[in-house]
Amino acid sequence: MIPFDFDYYAPETTGEAFNCYAKLSKAGKRPVWYAGGTELISMARVGSRTFGAVVDLKGVPDCTRLAAERGRIILGAALTLTEIARSGLFPLLGSTAARIADHTIQGKITLGGNLAGTIQYRETALPLLLCGARAHVMTAGGVEKRPFSQVFSGRLHLEDGEFLAAVDVPEREAELPHCHAKRTRQDKIDYPLVTLCAVRDGVSVRCAVSGYGSAPLLVPAQALAGGAAAVCGALAGEAADSLSGSGAYKRFVLENMVGQALANLEVK
């Protein structure tokens, strides 16, 4: 049970949603965006988050879009991890989504919620960073399409009132040979010790990891060219001690994961 009252709004278009949030903010209602709500509800229940109004994006068609059009895969930010995984449109993102939380929670967590959440791992960012994604951001001037790397650096960076309506990736990038691996401390369903995503484009490999440091990060291309040991050397300063494992142990795990990824992608 949430121990405070709040207003609820369910706009039907991106424009309605943006204007609704702006009016509520001006009125001092401290509105929040709502899509999956798993984190928002949990935080509100224990009193670590309060708000005066909720603007629900699940009824906005742009936010639940799932399509392949004109050579690009379009994924609404209010799609659940389950919907993304089952669609098969972006296999690497689907594999990543299918290892976040358990099956029940995957049906509630949304793409936008995972990217914008306070939990640092934000694993769905990894395939997007690797595959030339664009972010569809709702602004006062309408929807702007920006390079995903421009709005996401460790976490989602948007102006107050803006929201992520969708992302898109080139179909060609979504179909590249890829691999996904996740290591957890104990159980299969847990926060990552290290999550790794990699794609191969011709002879070139791109790689990104989460859990290793304090936020998702791209592996430098020049380090990948030097193999697994070179990657760990380049990222040595990023390895962070956590409840999942020490920085030293994470380096050991990452070196093995990179080596296996390069082998799986048949990189010599």
Image: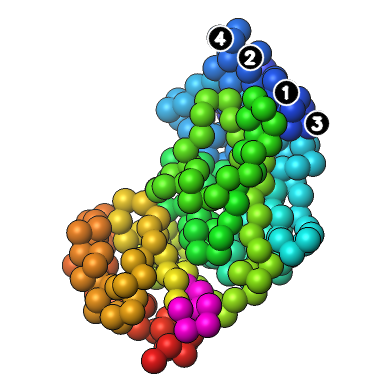
Name the residue: 31% across, 72% down.
Answer: 222
Q: Which stretch is magenta?
A: 198-204
Residue 28 shows which numbered tag?
A: 4
Within 10 Å of disc 4 (Cα), the crowding (few <14, some 14-19, many 20+) is: few
Q: Position of residue 18 (x, y in %)?
A: 68, 25
Q: Quadrant of residue 239?
A: bottom left
In the visual, does 268 lie left or right of 173? left
Where in the figure is residue 38, as x and y percent of width and height? 57, 41
Q: Which is more N-terminal, label 3 or label 2?
A: 3
Q: Residue at x 51, y 78 (%)?
A: 200
Helix, strand or loop at mark 3: loop
Residue 38 falls left or right of residue 195 = right
N-terminal of the pair, mark 4 or mark 3, is 3
Residue 72, percent from left and from top: 71, 61
Task: Judge the density around disc 2: few (<14), some (14-19), many (≥20) Cα neighbours within 10 Å.
Answer: some
**Marks 3 and 4: in contact by CB < 8 Å?**
no
| Magenta stretch: dominant secondary structure | strand
Please check the rendered image and state whether residue 236 is part of the magenta-colored stretch, yes or no: no
Q: Which residue is mark 2?
A: 24
Q: Seen in the image, is 255 located left or right of residue 5? A: left
Q: Which residue is mark 3?
A: 12
User: Could you tell me the amino acid type at mark 4?
Assistant: Gly
The Cα–Cα distance between marks 2 and 3, rounded to whole angstroms, is 16 Å
